[in-house]
Image: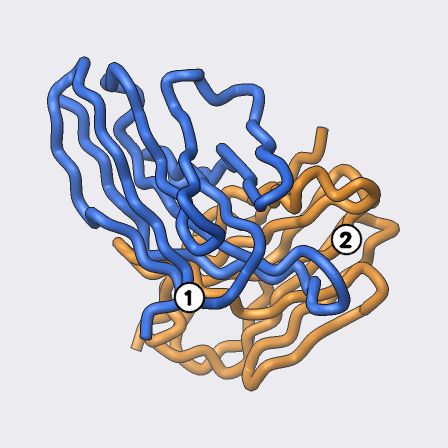
Amino acid sequence: KQEVTQIPAALSVPEGENLVLNCSFTDSAIYNLQWFRQDPGKGLTSLLLIQSSQREQTSGRLNASLDKSSGRSTLYIAASQPGDSATYLCAVRPGGNNAGNMLTFGGGTRLMVKP
Amino acid sequence: DTAVSQTPKYLVTQMGNDKSIKCEQNLGHDTMYWYKQDSKKFLKIMFSYNNKELIINETVPNRFSPKSPDKAHLNLHINSLELGDSAVYFCASSHTSGRDDTGELFFGEGSRLTVL
């Protein structure tokens, strides 16, 4: 059974810092890994999706890496801003027979960027 | 235009009642999902459904049933509501067949259910 863990559970940084969020998963047989952002009381917004054959994806100040063999992904946020404050979730999609594309989510990292 | 929309956004009801949450997607996706987010913010898959098959997470009580009138809609019906059903329920969709299958999920805004 796939398990996804995110560390740290919460993070508070001053504005302008670069930061790294970590995600680990127990079963390396994944199809892809997706990072989401969730604002309080809102739904999930997809940030980056990394296919199992890829090593990283970039979008603006965000960079996500994937090391499938070690079961790890990191989300790097450069020059953090107060508007980045949110909960960040990673989720893995199983490979193989696909199991209906049912994602397994980590518990999230709650990020606060202070002005 | 909202890609994945859910109604109602908030629902407060008594134990024992039956309720439904509706979901619609206008992305042309072939697969829709329901996820439950509990008070600790953990998101867990409940159902995955396309026009070929319904996959149910084995931990979901049979009081919960998805109903899909067409490819763009997947409603969640809950019978005999219990206190523990209080949570935020998220609908999502993706394209899971052919070369367009990136596996990327798009979520609705969530429906907060409170059972008293």
| Chain whose colour in the figure is blue | B
Residue A49: % across, % down: 65, 66
**Is residue A44 something one can see in this rendering?**
yes
The label nearer to you, 1 versus 2, is 1
Tell me how many marks there are: 2
Q: Is residue B8 left or right of residue A97?
A: left
Residue that numbered label 2 is attached to: A31
Residue that numbered label 1 is attached to: B26
Give above or below for B62 relative to B68: above
Q: Is residue A52 left or right of residue A1?
A: right
Quadrant of the drawing holding the N terminus of chain B: bottom left
Q: Nearer the viewer, residue A60 or B12?
A: B12
| Element under disc 2 | strand
Chain letter of the residue beneath label 2 in the structure image: A
Q: Callout 1, which amino acid?
A: Asn
Image point 28% across, 40% down: which residue?
A: B21
Image point 56% across, 28% down: which residue?
A: B56
Give above or below for B100 relative to B32: below
Image point 38% across, 46% down: which residue?
A: B90
Give above or below for A33 relative to B76: below
Q: Callout 2, which amino acid?
A: Tyr
Question: In which quarter of the view is residue A61 placed?
Answer: bottom right
**Is residue A12 something one can see in this rendering?**
no
| Chain whose colour in the figure is orange | A
Question: In which quarter of the view is residue B68 placed?
Answer: top left
Structural crowding at the residue carrying mark 2, measured as other residues with C-alpha within 10 Å and reported as few (<14), some (14–19) or many (≥20): some
Image point 65% across, 79% down: which residue?
A: A58
Quadrant of the drawing holding the C terminus of chain B: top left
